[in-house]
Image (tube, helix red, strand yellow):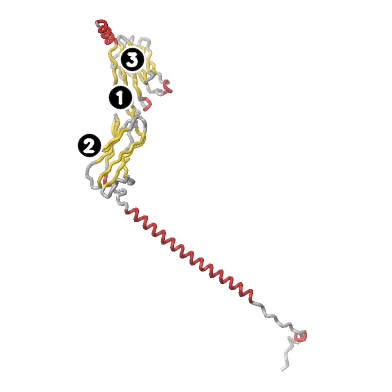
Amino acid sequence: MFHMFFLFCLCWCRLTGVFGESMSVMVGDSVTLKTDVTEIHEDDDILWTFGEENTLIAKINKDKQIFYTYDNVLNGRFKDRLKLDDQTGSLTITNIRTEHTGVYDLELNGLKLTSKTFNVSVHAPLPILDITRDCSSSSSSSSSCSLLCSVLNVSNVTLSWYKGISVLSSISASELSISLSLPLEVEYQDKNTYSCVLNNPIGNQTTHLDINTLCHTCANQSLPLMYIVLISAAAGSLMIVVIVLMCCICKKCRKTVQRQEEVRTESALWKPTKQKPKSKKDAVYENIPKKR
């Protein structure tokens, strides 16, 4: 029993502790993973690794003056983004991207062994919310309207409807980039304050609901119907006029054709009168004036 206690104390003195720290940052920011030491010693070795496979991304050997970052690992994911503090051994990731989300492990081996874990989550800026009137909703009535709050291509977020400061409904997205929509039904005369909120660990995006504007978008559904009736009536009248004009034109054409046929018939029945041929005697004395 004593030996077990001794081994435990030895391990405790050797291993100062294994810590986990969660950090949430926005795309484009810089994040510093701190070693929690004020100065590294000559015989200290520091290793920084990333991911489940513990890929080496930075190394420090103070005795040999080695301060090296492995920018080209993981297909250059960390290229020109890693900076080491030569005093404390802390690692800074600049211009961070979503692909840098993951677990970072620190191992400091010197007079004592120190290890630390950082769970870093990188979030894209929250998009603007879109609140629209859902005119196709079957639940809409003459006294209420259905609304839809939507957002595109988001991950690790929660979309919620609020009435004042109270949550009415909410829906969450996982790590996959998806689109979210959350419905809400309100009365036309409702005077309460409603808002749609999108949030993640580093911030939120809020859009307030204006019932008077959105719920009047398609509240008067008889107006479009009246337009449809008027357009249909105008189209019907125009069609009648066209038909009448066509009938008149056809009737006129038939009369013209009939008249032409009658003229051709009369021409065919008419025979020219034959003149009696003059005798030679008449022809000789035709131009002699007669005696009075």
Say whether residue 239 is left or right of residue 24.
right
Q: Which mark is residue 107?
A: 3
Which type of secondary structure does the marked residue at label 3 adopt?
strand
Q: Which residue is mark 1?
A: 23
Q: Measuring 48% from the left and 65% from the top, which residue is drawn there?
A: 247
Residue 213 vertical placement versus 45 (above, below): below
The residue carrying pointer 2 sits among few (fewer than 14), some (14 to 19) or many (20 or more) residues within 10 Å by Cα, namely few
Say whether residue 275 is left or right of residue 242.
right
Residue 98 vertical placement versus 133 (above, below): above
Q: Are marks 1 and 2 in contact (CB under 8 Å)?
A: no
- How far across and down, in percent of the image, does residue 151 sit? 34, 37
Which type of secondary structure does the marked residue at label 2 adopt?
strand
- The three-letter amino acid code for the residue at tag 1 is Met
Residue 146: which quarter of the image?
top left
Q: How far separated are the C-alphas under marks 3 and 1? A: 18 Å
The residue carrying pointer 1 sits among few (fewer than 14), some (14 to 19) or many (20 or more) residues within 10 Å by Cα, namely some
- How far across and down, in percent of the image, does residue 155 sit? 34, 31
Q: Which residue is mark 2?
A: 166
- How far across and down, in percent of the image, does residue 13 sit? 27, 9
Q: How far separated are the C-alphas under marks 3 and 2? A: 46 Å
- The three-letter amino acid code for the residue at tag 2 is Ser
Answer with mark 1 or mark 2, whichever residue precedes in sequence: 1
Q: Measuring 32% from the left and 24% from the top, which residue is drawn there?
A: 120
Q: Measuring 30% from the left and 31% from the top, which residue is drawn there?
A: 200
- How far across and down, in percent of the image, does residue 49 sit? 36, 18
Q: How far separated are the C-alphas under marks 1 and 2? A: 28 Å
Q: Residue furthest bottom?
A: 292
